[in-house]
Image (tube, rainbow, N blue to C red):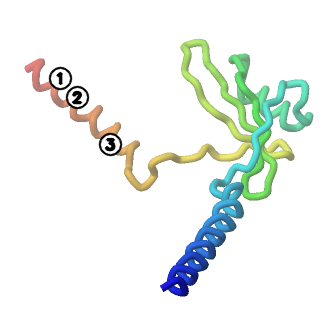
Amino acid sequence: MTRKWTILLIALMVVALCFAVATTGLAGKCGKKEKDQTLTLDQLPPAVRATLEAQAQGCTIEEIEKETEDGNTVYSADIVKADGTKSEVKIAEDGTLLPPEVENKDEGTAGEQSGDKDDDEAGESADAD
Protein backbone atom coordinates (compact mmCIF):
# COMPACT_ATOMS: atom_id res chain seq x y z
CA MET A 1 0.00 0.00 0.00
CA THR A 2 2.79 2.47 0.79
CA ARG A 3 4.36 1.74 -2.57
CA LYS A 4 1.18 2.93 -4.33
CA TRP A 5 1.19 6.16 -2.28
CA THR A 6 4.86 6.72 -3.09
CA ILE A 7 4.22 6.28 -6.83
CA LEU A 8 1.17 8.58 -6.64
CA LEU A 9 3.16 11.23 -4.76
CA ILE A 10 5.99 11.09 -7.31
CA ALA A 11 3.52 11.34 -10.19
CA LEU A 12 1.87 14.39 -8.61
CA MET A 13 5.25 16.05 -8.09
CA VAL A 14 6.18 15.43 -11.75
CA VAL A 15 2.87 16.93 -12.91
CA ALA A 16 3.35 19.96 -10.62
CA LEU A 17 6.90 20.45 -11.88
CA CYS A 18 5.76 20.24 -15.53
CA PHE A 19 2.99 22.76 -14.84
CA ALA A 20 5.41 25.15 -13.13
CA VAL A 21 7.91 24.97 -15.99
CA ALA A 22 5.20 25.42 -18.62
CA THR A 23 3.58 28.45 -16.97
CA THR A 24 6.81 30.29 -16.24
CA GLY A 25 8.10 29.64 -19.76
CA LEU A 26 4.93 31.00 -21.34
CA ALA A 27 4.37 33.94 -19.01
CA GLY A 28 6.28 36.46 -21.14
CA LYS A 29 5.07 35.11 -24.48
CA CYS A 30 1.28 35.19 -24.14
CA GLY A 31 0.69 38.27 -26.32
CA LYS A 32 2.27 40.22 -29.13
CA LYS A 33 3.53 42.93 -26.85
CA GLU A 34 6.41 42.31 -24.54
CA LYS A 35 7.24 45.41 -22.46
CA ASP A 36 5.90 48.92 -22.90
CA GLN A 37 7.92 52.00 -22.03
CA THR A 38 6.27 55.43 -21.68
CA LEU A 39 8.16 58.24 -23.43
CA THR A 40 7.92 61.97 -24.03
CA LEU A 41 7.92 63.61 -27.45
CA ASP A 42 11.54 64.71 -26.92
CA GLN A 43 12.65 61.09 -26.38
CA LEU A 44 11.40 59.88 -29.78
CA PRO A 45 13.72 59.24 -32.71
CA PRO A 46 13.51 62.16 -35.21
CA ALA A 47 11.71 60.14 -37.90
CA VAL A 48 9.07 58.89 -35.43
CA ARG A 49 8.59 62.35 -33.98
CA ALA A 50 8.10 63.91 -37.43
CA THR A 51 5.49 61.30 -38.39
CA LEU A 52 3.65 61.68 -35.08
CA GLU A 53 3.55 65.47 -35.32
CA ALA A 54 2.29 65.24 -38.91
CA GLN A 55 -0.47 62.87 -37.83
CA ALA A 56 -1.45 64.97 -34.83
CA GLN A 57 -1.86 68.17 -36.91
CA GLY A 58 -1.98 70.41 -33.85
CA CYS A 59 -4.13 68.05 -31.73
CA THR A 60 -3.14 66.94 -28.24
CA ILE A 61 -0.73 64.03 -28.09
CA GLU A 62 -1.26 61.83 -25.05
CA GLU A 63 0.68 58.85 -23.75
CA ILE A 64 3.46 57.85 -26.10
CA GLU A 65 4.69 54.29 -25.66
CA LYS A 66 7.59 52.32 -27.04
CA GLU A 67 6.54 48.71 -27.52
CA THR A 68 7.98 45.52 -28.93
CA GLU A 69 5.57 43.64 -31.20
CA ASP A 70 6.69 40.46 -32.92
CA GLY A 71 10.30 41.45 -32.28
CA ASN A 72 9.91 44.92 -33.86
CA THR A 73 10.06 48.25 -32.06
CA VAL A 74 6.81 50.19 -32.45
CA TYR A 75 5.83 53.58 -31.07
CA SER A 76 2.17 54.20 -30.28
CA ALA A 77 0.48 57.41 -29.21
CA ASP A 78 -3.04 58.56 -28.40
CA ILE A 79 -4.14 61.67 -30.26
CA VAL A 80 -7.08 63.67 -28.90
CA LYS A 81 -8.94 66.07 -31.20
CA ALA A 82 -10.59 69.30 -30.04
CA ASP A 83 -14.01 67.57 -29.97
CA GLY A 84 -12.62 64.94 -27.56
CA THR A 85 -12.40 62.02 -29.99
CA LYS A 86 -9.35 59.87 -29.39
CA SER A 87 -7.40 57.81 -31.90
CA GLU A 88 -4.26 55.74 -31.66
CA VAL A 89 -1.43 55.84 -34.16
CA LYS A 90 1.37 53.31 -34.44
CA ILE A 91 4.70 54.20 -36.00
CA ALA A 92 7.62 51.93 -36.88
CA GLU A 93 11.12 52.74 -35.71
CA ASP A 94 12.00 54.16 -39.15
CA GLY A 95 9.07 56.62 -39.03
CA THR A 96 6.68 54.59 -41.21
CA LEU A 97 3.03 54.97 -40.22
CA LEU A 98 1.58 51.53 -39.48
CA PRO A 99 -2.00 50.57 -40.31
CA PRO A 100 -4.47 50.68 -37.42
CA GLU A 101 -5.35 47.43 -35.70
CA VAL A 102 -8.78 46.07 -36.52
CA GLU A 103 -10.75 44.82 -33.53
CA ASN A 104 -13.61 42.31 -33.69
CA LYS A 105 -12.90 41.65 -37.36
CA ASP A 106 -14.63 38.26 -37.30
CA GLU A 107 -17.71 39.63 -35.54
CA GLY A 108 -18.37 42.30 -38.17
CA THR A 109 -18.80 45.10 -35.64
CA ALA A 110 -18.44 47.84 -38.25
CA GLY A 111 -21.15 46.25 -40.41
CA GLU A 112 -23.48 45.98 -37.43
CA GLN A 113 -22.97 49.63 -36.56
CA SER A 114 -23.70 50.81 -40.08
CA GLY A 115 -26.69 48.46 -40.21
CA ASP A 116 -28.04 49.94 -36.98
CA LYS A 117 -27.66 53.43 -38.40
CA ASP A 118 -29.56 52.49 -41.57
CA ASP A 119 -32.32 50.95 -39.46
CA ASP A 120 -32.58 54.13 -37.37
CA GLU A 121 -32.72 56.33 -40.44
CA ALA A 122 -35.35 54.08 -42.01
CA GLY A 123 -37.37 54.26 -38.79
CA GLU A 124 -37.13 58.04 -38.69
CA SER A 125 -38.29 58.40 -42.30
CA ALA A 126 -41.16 56.00 -41.61
CA ASP A 127 -42.12 58.04 -38.52
CA ALA A 128 -41.94 61.25 -40.50
CA ASP A 129 -44.60 59.99 -42.98
Q: Does 126 appear above or below 21?
A: above
Verify CB contact (< 8 Å) between mark 2 and mark 1: yes
The residue that label 1 is drawn on is 124
Q: Does 99 appear above or below 17?
A: above
Q: Disc 2 to disc 1, how far (Cα)? A: 6 Å
In the image: residue 32, left or right of residue 4: right
The residue that label 2 is drawn on is 120
Q: Disc 1 to disc 3, how far (Cα)? A: 18 Å
Tag 3 or tag 1, which sits nearer the N-term? 3
Image coords of residue 98 (percent x, y): 70, 46
Residue at coordinates 77% horizontally, 49% vertically from top-left? 68
Q: Secondary structure at mark 2?
A: helix
Image quadrant in which the C terminus is located: top left
Mark in the foreground, 1 or 3: 3
Query: Which residue in the rendered view is the most extreme toward the front?
Result: 1
Q: Quadrant of residue 54?
A: top right
Residue at coordinates 76% horizontally, 45% vertically from top-left? 35
Q: Amino acid at mark 3?
A: Glu
Q: Which mark is residue 112?
A: 3
* Disc 2 packing (10 Å; few <14; some 14–19; many ≥20): few
Image coords of residue 36 (percent x, y): 75, 40
Mark in the foreground, 3 or 2: 3
Query: Which residue in the rendered view is the most extreme toward the left?
Result: 129
Q: Secondary structure at mark 3?
A: helix
Which is nearer the eye, 24 or 40?
Answer: 24
* Disc 1 packing (10 Å; few <14; some 14–19; many ≥20): few
Residue at coordinates 38% horizontally, 49% vertically from top-left? 108
* Disc 3 packing (10 Å; few <14; some 14–19; many ≥20): few
